[in-house]
Image (spheres, helix red, strand yellow):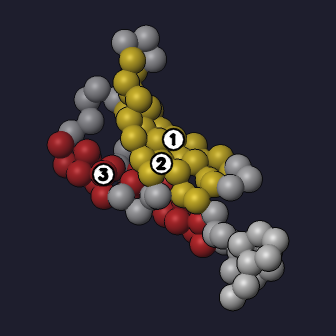
Amino acid sequence: MSASEVTAAAIAARLSAAGLHPRVEEHTQFTTVEAEVPDTLSADSWRKVLDAVADADRFGLVATSLNGRTLWAVVRKSVPTTGDVGGPGYQR
C-alpha cells in the first residue's frame, strides 16, 4: 500500500471513529475521502474530524441547503523521485 493510501485510510478510520461514514476513492494523482456531516455533530466530534483531515494535503467543507454538508479531503500521490521528473533536458 502506498503512503497516500495509508494516509487516506487513516483519515477515513478517524472519521469513522468520529461517527461519520467516509467514502475513499482512488484517482490517478490523488486519493479522496468524503463524508456527509450531520447537523447534530457535537463540538468534540468536530475537533476529531478536523484533526483527522489535517493530515490531508487539502480539505474543505461543501454546504448547500439542498444536499447538506459534505466534508472532503485530498491526499496527493507521491511524485516519482527518478526518471523524467524534470522533463527533457533536466539534470540532477
Between label 2 and label 1, give the one nearer the viewer.
2
Instruction: Label 2, secondary structure: give it.
Output: strand
The image's mark for residue 8 is: none
Drawn side of residue 9 relative to residue 44, left or right: right
Q: Residues within 10 Å of mark 3 (few under 14, many from 20)?
A: some
In the displayed structure, 39 sits above or below 84; it is above
Q: Report the Cα–Cα distance between label 1 and label 3.
A: 13 Å
The image's mark for residue 34 is: 1
Locate residue 82: give its quadrant: bottom right
The percent coordinates of residue 89 (x first, y second) are: 79, 76
The residue positioned 39% from the left and 54% from the top of the image is 53
The answer to whether marks 1 and 3 mark residues whose Cβ atoms lie closer than 8 Å is no
Q: Quickly name the residue at label 3.
A: 50
Q: Residues within 10 Å of mark 2 (few under 14, many from 20)?
A: many
Q: Report the Cα–Cα distance between label 3 and label 2.
A: 10 Å
The answer to whether marks 2 and 1 mark residues whose Cβ atoms lie closer than 8 Å is yes
Q: Quickly name the residue at label 2.
A: 73
In front of the other: 82 or 56: 82
The percent coordinates of residue 5 (x first, y second) are: 62, 64
Q: Amino acid at mark 2?
A: Ala
Drawn side of residue 88 relative to residue 72, left or right: right
Q: Amino acid at mark 3?
A: Leu
Badge 1 or badge 3: first in the primary sequence: 1
The answer to whether marks 3 and 2 mark residues whose Cβ atoms lie closer than 8 Å is no
View extreme (bottom): residue: 92
